Image (tube, coloured by chain):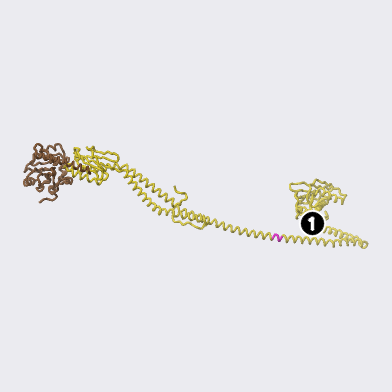
Chain colours: A brown, B yellow
Amino acid sequence: MRSAFLSALLGACCIAWSGIQVGQAQTAETVPVTERSIKAAYLCKFAGYVEWPDARIHAAKPLTIGVLESSEMADELIRITAGRLINDRPVQVRRVTGGDSLAGLHVLFVGAHEPERLDELLLPARKLPILTVTESAGALSDGSIINFTIDRERVRFEVSLAAAERSRLKLSSRLLAVAQRVQRTPES
Amino acid sequence: MIPLHASIHRKMLVVMLATAAFALLLTAAAMLYYDLRSFRQLWVTDLTAQADIIGFAATPAIEFEDRQAAADYLESLKGKPSIIAAAIYSANGSQFATYTATGGKAVEFPALPALDGYSVKGNELDLFKRIVSGQEILGTVYIKAQFDIFGRLLNYLGIVGAVMVLSLLASLLIARRMQQKVTQPILEIAGVARTVMDKRDFSSRASKTTEDEIGVLVDAFNGMLAEIEHVIDERKRTQFALEDSESRLLELNAELEQRVEARTAQLAAANKDLEGFSYSVSHDLRAPIRAIGGFAVLLGEDHQTELGEEAKRKISIIRSEAARMGQLIDDLLAFSRLGRKALEPSDLDMAEVANNVYVRLNHADPNRTVDFRLGSMPHAWGDRALFEQVWMNLLSNAIKFSAKKKQPVIEIGGISAENEHVYFVRDNGAGFDSRYQAKLFGVFQRLHREEEFPGTGVGLALVHRIVTRHGGRVWADGKPDEGATFHFSLPKEASDGGV
């Protein structure tokens, strides 16, 4: 009991420490990669818990991650996915700008935007089997499937099952278990 | 193990229960051995699977840095009391989440995770299992478990014991019920056999209820009983018949004896009457015949002058015939008297007796020139007066029948045989045809004509009677014209002298 308490305390300290790091990244320009690198790593790991339609047909093709108007994230992704396989597939990172065709993408990351702009950017991806990931508060109501949040200075995420269903994607319950929030019905 | 005098019922029960118990024990031992042997391996496999499950479930928690979720997964281990502690280490080797069983002692977690595998210390087992996703090592699951092999053994033995007690009880019930089918007929036979032995009652029978070997036994047993009963019946009947016939035989015997006695008495009486009659007849005849003889003499003498020669001759015939008849009557009286006179036996020098008799006979007619040869003779035990008559008759016969020879020879003698003395008188006279031997010793039996050799025919009968009264025998052999030999024997032991 006592040791459990101690380890819990220790865990809390660790979280606090990593939170400090994140905080530093936001304030100091010298280490802006920390939050970004965590999000980039998470972005790669999401692919392991998602099942795309016709996955078997496209199994041999590389997993393509599109990054919309966020070159920092694109750089970071390219850095960490070099020579790495996700779901036994090589990874390809594609930089995308507004109005580009989204065909062939598996994952689309959209950086922080105003809700109207975000809605506009996500619209073309709605009908396609693309896992859309955002980092704006309330982005799930704009049609995003996964949205990064900061919870007590820790990077976490929330999931919209309705959006995933609309895009014909299946999300693993194991992923849902660690999500901060799971939205099961579409928000009006 | 089983007492010898125990009933077959109990013996079978013991056998069945022993078999069941043995089989159960063997099975339990084999199962226990197998279980203990495979227990640890199974256990390790089980724990490894458990670690895999935790690792798999906790993968997103590690990937997305969710310590609370990882701790929640570990918390699910509280359903397994044998796991006393567990931890998840992250890929860089730091503790990510830990778990300690409630109520358990404080556990010191390893600072760094080890490679996949397990190590056993006492009854504690440490197991490490890496969490791998794709080709990436995400972390390690650590499980510390305690196995209570002694408790398991006790538990196991408890179950085995309970099962054994229950199954023995069950088999006792089943055996009790089922063995009756086997033992009941045997017990019945035994009961009948006991009845037969105790009461000697061979009429009881065992009832046949099965068609197996016991049925055969019952049949054989009943068959034997029937046979014994039959034999005993037969024997009883035979015995009755035997007793019956025996008693009848005894009855018959007694009756027969009675009859013989009666007949003997009748015969003796008749004999006595006959002897009395012949004696009185002889006695009474003597007087008239003397009178006839006497008056014939008187007639011849008194009327000598009146009678012619022819008359004189006829008177002399009357005289001689009367004399002969008188002699006949005298002989008969002597013979008859012999049967009534008691013996007066004494030691007899036979040679002396015979010689005296011969001298007396010879004295009557000294002109005769007989070659008389007196041999040696053994002494005998007998009535002197009677043996004088024996010798008298035999010697006078010998003289009479040899008288016509030119040189008559008479030889007498005697020898001692094993049990008797044998005496003989031999002459070279007229002899006899041996065909008539049987008639020699009968009363009034004569082999020669009166004109040839005078005699009454009583002599040899008298000899026969005297010798047989002394317990001896008489016999003779001879040939016509070549002489005859008369033998008589007397027992060495004195005879009491009944006829």
Residue nearest the observer in this picture, A91 or A2:
A2
Local crowd size for mark 1, using a 10 Å CA cut-off: few (<14), some (14–19), many (≥20): few
**Whether residue B135 is visible:** no
Residue B411: x and y, percent?
81, 47
Give B271 or A35, whichever is nearer the viewer: A35
Height in image: A26 above or below B301?
Answer: above
Residue A34 position in % (x across, y down)? 12, 39
Query: Quadrant of the rendered structure where residue B243 is?
Result: bottom right
Q: Chain of mark 1?
A: B
Coordinates of residue B439 in the picture (x, y in percent): 76, 54
Q: Is residue A135 visible?
A: yes
Please, which residue is most extreme toward the right here? B305
Amino acid identity at mark 1:
Lys
Left/right placement of residue B215 relative to residue B380 reads left
Residue A44, position as x, y percentages in the image: 14, 41
Asked which secondary structure carries label 1, the reply is loop
**Would you identify the image quadrant in which residue A26 lies?**
top left
Is A40 magenta? The answer is no
Query: Is B75 displayed left or right of B300 in the figure?
Result: left
Which region shows up in magenta? B259-263
* Residue pointed to by mark 1: B341
Q: Tell me: B6 left or right of B81.
A: right
Magenta segment's dominant SS is helix
Q: Locate the C terminus of chain B by quadrant.
A: bottom right
